[in-house]
Image: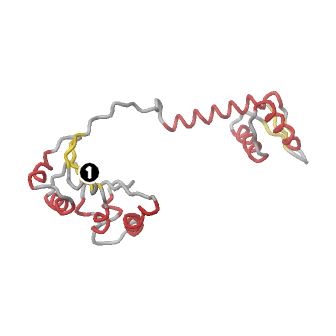
Amino acid sequence: VTDEAHNFAPKGYDSPSKSILKEISQEGRKYGTFLILATQRPTLLDETITAQLNTKFIFRTVRASDIQTIKEETDITEEEARRLPYLRTGDVFISEALMGRTIFARIRAANTTSPHTENPFDELINRSEAEDEKFYNIIKNKLPINGDDFINIIQEIERDTGITYTINVFEEKLEDLVSKGKLKKEKTPFYNVYKG
């Protein structure tokens, strides 16, 4: 998905992304890769790429040059082209190769609500904190944990909870709790000791 696509695949000059988008538009379908381009300036978009697009959603546009490009790229009629500057929000012409004809449609507002009730970044932080709390509750009765006893502790946890950790993941989780101040780490000459 590329918004402001005319900046990434401009007509008349090269950009670092243009060759990649051109290759995807020409070869992507056979690999199951598809391209969605959005632009308010279709005239500025590379013609090789626009020629490969099977479906075009045409919303309100007022520039004569863009309307002319749209007429050339689709089978939109003169009457429909004259309507383009006056389309309301949600009004769209859809040009699709399989239909063989450009059709008018009205897209209504979604009747759904986002499953996210909080900021996604807050959600990630809360999820991380919940995972930390879950891990802490699993290990708190096993503290202190000696570095030379990881295998036995991991086996106990797997037996008690069904959760499996590799030694590396287990140690990373302990270190993470140390960095967050939930555990203390004491270094000995042979191994680290993690304490509550």
Q: Is residue 11 left or right of residue 160?
A: left
Residue 54: x and y in percent read 30, 58
Q: Could you tell me the amino acid type at mark 1?
A: Phe
Question: Residue at the spot x=35%, y=53% of the render?
Answer: 3
Say if 161 sits above or below 12 in the image: above
Q: Is residue 66 left or right of residue 177?
A: left
Residue 44: x and y in percent read 25, 63
Residue 113: x and y in percent read 39, 30
Question: Residue at the spot x=33%, y=58% of the render?
Answer: 5
Task: Quadrant for the C terminus, please.
Answer: top right
Disc 1 target residue: 57
- Name the foreground residue: 97 vs 117: 97
Residue 178: x and y in percent read 73, 38
Numbered label tally? 1
Say if 47 sits above or below 112 in the image: below
Neighbours of disc 1 within 10 Å: few (<14), some (14-19), many (20+): some
